[in-house]
């Protein structure tokens, strides 16, 4: 293999680093907003959508705050704070609107190829959890965005919603569940692939096997990227200029920002969390369960690692996933490097990283010890959900990596955050997404923030074009019950999410 260097070809209006759901979403929005802009995507792997966005690298939950306990919390007076769940649901309604618009304009194919209705359940075990779930349901279901949510502490009813949960369960243990039939399962890998397929036909250059290795500012304020370009028998380094760069590089986004020397990224670090799923393909077991069931994780476990039992619909086939089981692994991407974590240490983020580790000793220990948790232990965790689970039906698979954000705090220390954050240059010429939760489900809202912060002078021009894709943009669905009901009904009809449960 030879290595050659080529000089810049032409400056692109936009270069996207990474071919995951974030870059795909941003590129589709930009193509609708400014069809004449030149856009290129560089992806280091042979395929797009093959890292965290790939179907079995994530759980495929269309996060809408219906079942995830970490979006609701108990106030000191015993009331339940549902604001984070409401905010997430509103964001997911925009995702549904964008997907529905793209289906209507035939950017996306038959919705069942990437999104399917799968009820979202929350399972509570023991008196304290049952009591909280009841109060959570009372507060949530009084809000129009959650009006479809049902509660039951009757094992017969719960068994009708999800038979695997109750079969063989000790009857002396109090249990309860909520069920919301408006939940969904999304194959983000397929969605990413379909979006890139459309983009390719709109003159967006999609270069695979191309890794961005470096970037620097040109004198005119544009960026020059150094791309390592591999073919079967050749390898060359190409220099590419861009007016705007988006690092949709998943766990490697921080690396890009550090290479760019962006002051806005100073002090940021990442805390990688690996994951494993138990996967079941036995048609009999798979057919007995159509739901995503979330519960509480073990004490000290990160909220992102609460175990859940998920129906997955991927390429028309159904499977069950249980997990993710978190673990320690220094890679920032599944196909990253063992040196990712040490190489990301810089004088500006060492103090925040050390402070974060000190504050999260229990979590670090839990992740480390989980690496040695046997298959037997994982099956025991599964049997808390599926008491009659048989070992031979379940196989362990590796999930994607999550790189959680570590940020400097006001006291010179560091905090671990479980959300997603857009980091952008002050002049808007480069931006990146860090963090992984709620992630793919809210990609459109995250990309709207990128547009707002990096292209403020286009805001007035783009607003009507964005409204054509997401009609309720700028309106609060949390406050406008009529608009919320209308919109949810419309997107459910287009995406074929209502009244149809796969199976
Ligand atoms: C275990 C797990 C469970 C999850 N569950 C859910 C869920 O249920 N629902 C949900 O909404 N979200 C979930 N997520 C989060 C979701 O998967 C991510 O938020 C989302 O896929 C991130 O998309 P992305 O485009 O930023 O990154 P990715 O999909 O990781 O794509 C980044 C791409 O950039 C490429 N790349 C990196 N560096 C370079 C470079 N220098 N040059 C060229 N290419 C580069 C990578 O190869 C990769 O293809 C989960 C994540 C994990 C790990």
Image (spheres, helix red, strand yellow):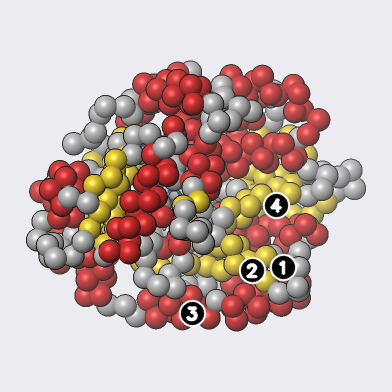
C-alpha distance separating marks 2 and 1: 6 Å
| Position of residue 186 in the picture relative to residue 450 (left or right) | left
Q: Can residue 87 be seen in this view?
A: yes
* Viewer-side label of 2, 4: 2
Describe the element under mark 2 as helix, strand or loop. strand
Element under disc 3: helix
Between the residue at mark 1 and the residue at mark 3, the CA separation in whole angstroms equals 20 Å
Q: Look at the numbered discs 2 and 1 and tell me whether their residues touch, using CB distance below 8 Å.
A: yes
User: Sequence-wise, which precedes: disc 2 or disc 4?
Assistant: 2
Are there few (<14), some (14-19), or many (20+) residues within 10 Å of tag 2? Answer: many
Q: First in sequence, mark 4 or 1: give its number.
A: 1
Instruction: Give the residue at mark 1.
Output: 409
Residue 189 x/y as whole percent: 42, 43
Q: Which of 72 and 22 is in front in this view?
A: 72
Q: In which quarter of the image is residue 186?
A: top left
Task: Give the SS element for disc 4.
Answer: strand
Q: Is residue 41 left or right of residue 179?
A: right
Image quadrant of residue 373?
A: bottom left
Q: Which residue is labeled 2 in the image?
A: 415
Cα gap from disc 4 to disc 1, whole angstroms? 16 Å
């Amino acid at each position: 293999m030879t290595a050659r260097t080529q000089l810049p070809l032409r400056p692109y209006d936009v270069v996207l680093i990474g071919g995951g759901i974030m870059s795909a979403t941003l590129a589709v929005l930009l193509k609708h907003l400014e069809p004449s802009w030149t856009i290129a995507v560089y992806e280091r792997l042979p395929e797009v959508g093959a890292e965290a966005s790939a179907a079995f690298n994530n759980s495929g939950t269309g996060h809408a705050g219906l079942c995830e306990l970490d979006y609701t919390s108990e106030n000191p007076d015993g009331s339940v704070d549902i604001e984070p769940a409401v905010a997430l649901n509103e964001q997911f309604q925009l995702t549904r609107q964008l997907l529905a618009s793209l289906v209507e304009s035939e950017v996306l194919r038959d919705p069942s190829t990437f999104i399917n209705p799968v009820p979202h359940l929350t399972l509570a075990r023991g008196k304290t959890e049952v009591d909280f779930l009841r109060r959570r349901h009372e507060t949530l279901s009084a809000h129009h965005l959650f009006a479809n949510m049902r509660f039951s502490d009757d094992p017969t009813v719960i068994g009708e919603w999800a038979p695997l949960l109750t079969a063989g369960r000790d009857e002396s243990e109090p249990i309860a569940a909520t069920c919301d039939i408006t939940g969904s399962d999304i194959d983000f890998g397929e969605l990413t692939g379909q979006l890139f397929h459309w983009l390719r036909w709109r003159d967006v250059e999609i270069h695979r096997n191309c890794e961005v290795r470096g970037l620097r500012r040109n004198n005119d304020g544009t960026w020059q990227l150094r791309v390592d370009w591999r073919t079967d028998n050749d390898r060359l380094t190409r220099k590419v200029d861009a007016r705007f760069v988006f690092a949709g590089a998943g766990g490697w986004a921080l690396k890009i920002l550090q290479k760019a020397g962006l002051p806005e990224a100073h002090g940021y670090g990442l805390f990688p969390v690996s994951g494993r799923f138990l996967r079941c393909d036995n048609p009999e077991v798979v057919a007995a369960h159509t739901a995503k069931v979330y519960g509480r994780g073990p004490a000290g476990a990160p909220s992102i690692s609460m175990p859940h039992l998920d129906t997955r619909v991927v390429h028309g086939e159904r499977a069950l996933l249980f997990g993710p089981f978190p673990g320690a692994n220094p890679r920032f991407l599944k196909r990253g490097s063992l040196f990712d974590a040490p190489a990301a240490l810089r004088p500006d983020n060492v103090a925040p990283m050390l402070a974060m580790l000190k504050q999260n000793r229990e979590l670090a220990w839990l992740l480390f010890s989980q690496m040695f948790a046997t298959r037997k232990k994982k099956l025991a965790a599964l049997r808390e959900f599926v008491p009659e689970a048989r070992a031979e039906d379940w196989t362990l698979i590796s999930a994607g990596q999550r790189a959680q954000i570590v940020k400097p705090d006001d006291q010179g220390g560091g905090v671990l955050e479980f959300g997603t954050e857009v980091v952008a240059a002050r002049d808007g010429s480069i931006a990146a997404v860090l963090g992984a939760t709620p992630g793919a489900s809210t990609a459109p809202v995250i990309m709207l923030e990128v547009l707002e912060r990096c292209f403020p002078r286009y805001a007035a021009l783009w607003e009507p074009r964005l409204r054509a894709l997401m009609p309720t943009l700028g309106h609060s669905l949390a406050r406008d019950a009529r608009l919320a009901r209308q919109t949810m009904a419309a997107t459910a009809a287009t995406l074929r999410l209502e009244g149809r449960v796969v199976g």
